[in-house]
Image (tube, rainbow, N blue to C red):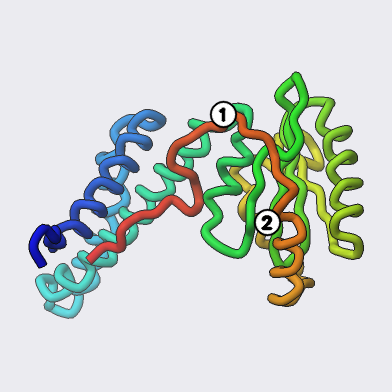
Amino acid sequence: MFGRKKKDPNAPKKVRFKTIRDAYSLAAKEYSFVLLRCLVIFAPIWAIGILIGAQFGRPGYAAFLSFPVAFLGAFFFFTRLASNAAYASIEGQPGAGASVLMSIRKGWTISSAVGVNKSQDMVHRAVGKAGIVLVAEGGFGVRTLLNDERKKMERFAPGVPIYEVIVGNAEGQVSVRKLQRAMKKFPKKLSTVQLRELRARLKAVGGMNIALPKGPMPKNLRMPKPR
């Protein structure tokens, strides 16, 4: 039809390239010689593959087979560098925990900054099949914010499991780097119907609109699959 834009067949490749470029830029800010580091992983793996093939008189064939294995090893190492750099870029900033929570792709509905005080201590609410998880970050005021939000949730959603997580590096707290992993450990206690009802019940219970750190998030940093 006249006026309709044609789809760019190269669009997926452009997106993958931009993703790699952004990840590389992020990693380069935190680590020096990123490509060289990746080569240090790639070269030994490939060399070992060639040496094994040489023992059977087929070094060329072994080089062909081991190349993608070496590339995957280097690529995985690169994603780890980018992931760690992403964490480092937001760690210690107000709202870093919310940024990590919002990077969880599925299973949770996140309401950021449902409770905030003047010291920028804050509580975020995550709703999933585990129930309600209150994630706090900040200083001494987080405990008061957590208690207030727990009481509110007990009033709006009686009988629903409520968990508390405090983001930080002190004993008993969960670091930003391990927050997503901690969220996955909560047992699933609600059915799909119960979860739908809970979300509908809490839909009107909003948070506050404050500035949160932005940027690529760790762990779930989306990287193109190597071909």
Judged left or right of residue 109, residue 53 is left
Residue 227 falls in image quadrant: bottom left
Judged left or right of residue 43, residue 151 is right
Question: Mark 2 against mark 1, which lies toward the viewer?
Answer: 1
Residue 29 falls in image quadrant: top left
Residue 24 falls in image quadrant: top left
In the image, residue 193 lies at what x, y percent?
72, 76
Local crowd at mark 2 within 10 Å, few (<14), some, or many (≥20)?
Answer: some
Judged left or right of residue 38, residue 172 is right
Local crowd at mark 1 within 10 Å, few (<14), some, or many (≥20)?
Answer: few
Task: Tell me which residue sits at (25%, 41%) in the image.
Answer: 35
Q: In this figure, which residue is indicated by the disc labeled 1? A: 211
Q: Residue furthest front?
A: 2
Disc with the residue nearer the chain's start (2 vs 1): 2
Whether label 2 touches label 1, CB < 8 Å: no
Instruction: Tell me the tag on residue 183.
Output: 2
Task: Tell me which residue sits at (37%, 37%) in the image.
Answer: 27
Q: Nearer the viewer, residue 4 or 180?
A: 4
In the image, residue 18 lies at what x, y percent?
25, 46
Quarter holding the N terminus is: bottom left
Instruction: Tell me the tag on residue 143.
Output: none
Task: Tell me which residue sits at (12%, 61%) in the image.
Answer: 6
